[in-house]
Image (cartoon, grey):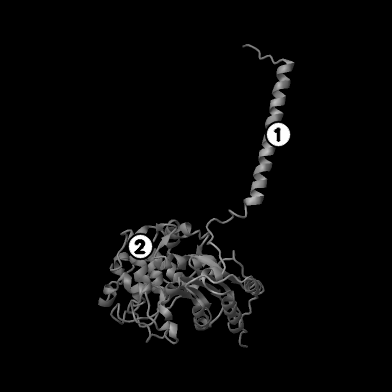
Amino acid sequence: MPRLVIGVQDFRIMMASMKSRVAFSAVLVSVVSLWLLIFGSVFADVTALPRSTPEEQGISSTAVRSFIEAADDQIDTLHSFMLLRHGHVIAEAWWKPESADKPHVMWSLSKSYNATAVGFAAGEGKLSLDDPVLKFFPEEAPADPSANLQAMRVRDLLTMSGGHDVEPKFDLEVGPSVKDFLAHPVTHQPGTYFRYNTPGSYMLSAIVTKATGQTVIDYLKPRLFEPLGIKNPEWGTTAEGYNFGGYGLFIRTEDIAKFGQLYLQKGEWNGKQLLPVSWVEAATKKQVENDKAPSGRTSDWQQGYGFQFWRCQHNAYRGDGRDGQICLVIPEQDAVIAITAKTGQMQTELDLVWEKLLPAFRDQALPSNAAELAKLQQVAADLTAHPAKQAK
């Protein structure tokens, strides 16, 4: 076998070449590191909503500050607030120790996301809103189902009018049960009697899984969460393998705002139609009356109910959840408001929107006001949560 002979001069040339490559690699690493240092923050979250000032989007910083100060004074306690106008975040605030990157429990605001999965599945032809509920659960159905149970449809679950006189009992930690729900007496003809019903929302979650072969959270990831840049959502699951549906979702404040903006835009996002327009319109309009229900004690709980969305005063609509979680959409003002909280004062949250923000919206941009904007930003930066004192 021939021997490889390398002369001294060849060896020197080879070593010089290796040194040159090492030096080039070091320079390249330095350049990339410098680029990331300078521009990394700019591209840190390309899915974030665009930012603007209140004045640029037709509302004064003074009005927004007045809302935040009133909410901080009158409500025990908000955790976060975000205001969107014309698709731009124009105000945002967190009550310490809450923060922008901290996921928050949605409680029943989860229902609106859960229903959105139904909307996607219906749009893809995987189910119909007029499908009987029993169609999906032949093994869990009672041996002799009542006529009312046989008549219960998917749309009846969406509108909280499945026919139950009272909500089936369940353990929040464990979650509802399909079999228990189907065994519960269906006193009223489905579609005729509104009764808030979290196990009914759980049934919608189970139906989506039966129709698609995926849990709601997995089904929504490529259709909703990923397109909107909603990162690392968490949703509890029952022993039956279904997401809780009616509660249990954890996401961030901006994720709520994005969801509201999607609905405000009739299901369109970045030039692509994600949700069918027909679904958005049906889900957010009044499908059933709810003013006589036990939940109808205050004005914004008497305006009608859609597909897991509440109608509000001022032609607005919302998803909401226990302790003050709110995704409020005001189409006539092209505005979305996201709130997280730990409070029993949900009507006060909405009342302050109607009192402080709604009258302040203008059709045109306002002159810039650096001084008032600075005051707003300072107030937003100095907030601390103050939970209501527990009765002894």
Depth check, front residue: 214 or 12: 12
For disc 1, the marked residue is: 23
Occupied quadrant, residue 103: bottom right
Number of numbered markers: 2
- Secondary structure type for disc 2: loop
Residue 136 placed where, x, y %? 32, 65
Q: Is residue 322 visible?
A: yes
Q: What element carries label 1?
A: helix
Disc marking residue 369: none
Q: Distance between the residues labelled 2 and 1?
A: 56 Å
Disc 2 + disc 1, Cβ < 8 Å: no
Q: Where is residue 316 in the image (x, y as percent from the top left)?
A: 42, 76
Position of 292 with respect to 51 (left or right) is left
Residue linked to disc 2: 276
* Residue 65, image x, y percentages: 60, 77
Kind of residue at badge 1: Ala
